[in-house]
């Protein structure tokens, strides 16, 4: 499967909303950095505009199961193999990543890693035995983004002074409301909106792949992105924001590299490069609450529930996916426990669905409507795990680190992983500062 390094160059400002309504005296909050799902949606919509009818190289259409039909799953399932990573700012060839939330700023403007201290009488959840504390006092705030070089210093536990680079700014404009039925302006209906404008020499970098297996054909995988003629225009965000997508020079996600084995106990730190979604798994008190806590962590003990790798972990030839997952669940789990977390404010977002199931339950009828509001763990959030032994440490590293075995991208969000959610990087939590 070919992974493409791509860059997006907006032709003007972009309007990228979250879940906040545009009402009353509020300015339309559209000057947000593009979310992973906005990028993914823009790309798959572009595929449909480019090929409005099913192509021969796509193979036969997917036949929906009874469960899919009863749930009102109305997607065409075309191009469902699309996977993305990003988007991230790239300035003068240097990629920038969300600043980790476990960094503090001293009076000289240096960023230092926070310390861990016993949670004691704090109001943290009982499974978190340790709390983050800052080693310095000050009023300065860390930047929203740090360069790849600065991120490498963070992963190694070294203090650093971040490079100061302007990436984008907010532009406010006044508009007139439009009647959607007539297309004419509405008298006396004005609104204020915020827009995102990138600085000069700044673009939006991301990775993308889409290799589909045509149903009913023996031609092997088809590279959908390879069939696009680049550069190509792309509509992203609201108000028909237009950008140009082109091939880009290769860049890499941050990676600390697996540390050498040691007899010293190691604490693994997992820092999110993108938001992550962990939904609640039920309404009763015993169900996993989701939210800030990954669904692959026991919500009562903090134990990691990911299966430990072994010689028979791979999917067997001809094995059904559900059977493979059931077999994996029967294997032993990675012996590690969550001991600390620094999360930050949730990222709320929503959207508009053109093909929702009608309220009358008729699977054949559709309506338009708002998508459910999601609350994601923000990029930069940090989780710290204590591993029982070196084998557990290495297994957890391979399961969580963005660059997994065979250069596969690990996506640890419970939903929207294909859209770039839940991508994080591992490092050793610094114990000496």
Image: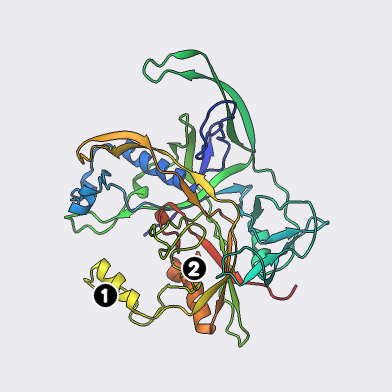
Q: Is residue 376 above or below residue 32?
A: below
User: Residue tagged by mark 2?
Assistant: 400
Going 47% across and 41% down the picture, which residue do you hit? 245
Q: Is residue 366 above or below residue 385?
A: above
Residue 65: tell me if it is visible: no
Q: Locate residue 278, reporting x and y percent.
A: 45, 58
Q: Locate residue 308, reporting x and y percent.
A: 42, 78
Outermost top residue: 187
Q: Secondary structure at mark 2?
A: helix
Q: Secondary structure at mark 1?
A: loop
Going 59% across and 77% down the picture, which residue do you hit? 259
Q: Locate residue 243, reporting x and y percent.
A: 49, 36
Is 198 situated left or right of 412 in this image?
right
Is 14 situated left or right of 46 in this image?
right
**Closer to the camera in the image, 260 or 278:** 278
Going 73% across and 76% down the picture, which residue do you hit? 432
Going 18% across and 55% down the picture, which residue do you hit? 217
Q: How many marks do you count on the picture?
A: 2
User: Residue tagged by mark 1?
Assistant: 316
Residue 328: tell me if it is visible: yes
Q: Quadrant of residue 44?
A: top left
Q: Locate residue 379, reporting x and y percent.
A: 56, 54
Quadrant in the picture for the C terminus: bottom right
Frontmost of labels 1 and 2 is 2
Q: Are marks 1 and 2 in contact (CB under 8 Å)?
A: no
Q: Quadrant of residue 370?
A: top left
Is 190 situated left or right of 166 in this image?
left
Q: Is residue 188 above or below residue 47?
A: above
Mark before the other along the chain sequence, 1 or 2: 1
Outermost bottom residue: 263
Quadrant in the picture for the N terminus: bottom left
Q: Is residue 79 above or below residue 336?
A: above
């Amino acid at each position: 499967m070919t992974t493409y390094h791509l860059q997006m160059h907006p032709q003007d400002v972009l309007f990228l909303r979250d879940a906040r309504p545009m009402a009353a005296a509020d300015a339309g909050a559209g000057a947000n950095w593009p979310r992973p799902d906005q990028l993914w949606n823009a790309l798959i919509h572009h595929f449909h505009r480019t090929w409005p009818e099913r192509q021969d190289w796509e193979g036969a259409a997917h036949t929906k199961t009874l469960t899919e039909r009863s749930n009102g799953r109305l997607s065409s399932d075309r191009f469902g193999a699309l996977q993305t990573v990003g988007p991230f700012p790239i300035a003068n060839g240097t990629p920038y990543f969300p600043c980790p939330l476990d960094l503090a700023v001293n009076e000289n403007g240096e960023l230092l890693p926070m310390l861990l201290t016993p949670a004691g009488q704090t109001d943290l959840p009982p499974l978190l035995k340790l709390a983050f504390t800052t080693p310095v006092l000050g009023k300065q705030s860390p930047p929203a983004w740090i360069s790849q070089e600065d991120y490498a210093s963070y992963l190694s536990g070294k203090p650093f002074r971040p490079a100061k680079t302007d990436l984008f700014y907010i532009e406010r404009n006044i508009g007139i409301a439009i009647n959607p039925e007539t297309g004419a302006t509405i008298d006396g209906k004005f609104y204020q909106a915020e827009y995102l404008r990138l600085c000069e020499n700044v673009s939006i970098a991301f990775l993308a792949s889409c290799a589909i297996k045509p149903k009913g054909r023996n031609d092997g995988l088809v590279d959908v992105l390879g069939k696009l003629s680049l550069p190509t225009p792309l509509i992203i965000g609201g108000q028909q924001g237009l950008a140009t997508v082109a091939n880009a020079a290769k860049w890499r996600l941050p990676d600390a590299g697996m540390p050498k084995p040691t007899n010293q106990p190691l604490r693994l730190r997992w820092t999110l490069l993108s938001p992550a979604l962990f939904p609640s798994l039920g309404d009763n008190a015993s169900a996993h609450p989701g939210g800030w806590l990954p669904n692959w962590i026991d919500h009562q003990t903090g134990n990691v529930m990911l299966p430990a790798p072994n010689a028979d972990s791979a999917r067997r030839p001809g094995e059904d996916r559900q059977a493979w997952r059931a077999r994996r669940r029967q294997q032993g789990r990675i012996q590690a426990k969550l001991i600390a977390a620094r999360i930050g404010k949730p990222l709320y977002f929503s959207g508009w669905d053109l093909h929702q199931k009608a309220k009358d339950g008729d699977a054949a009828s559709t309506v338009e409507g708002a998508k459910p509001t999601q609350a994601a763990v923000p990029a930069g959030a940090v989780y710290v795990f204590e591993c029982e032994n070196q084998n557990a440490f290495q297994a957890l590293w391979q399961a969580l680190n963005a660059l997994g075995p065979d250069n596969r991208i690990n996506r640890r969000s419970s939903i929207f992983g294909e859209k770039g959610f839940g991508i994080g990087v591992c490092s050793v939590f610094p114990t000496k500062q």
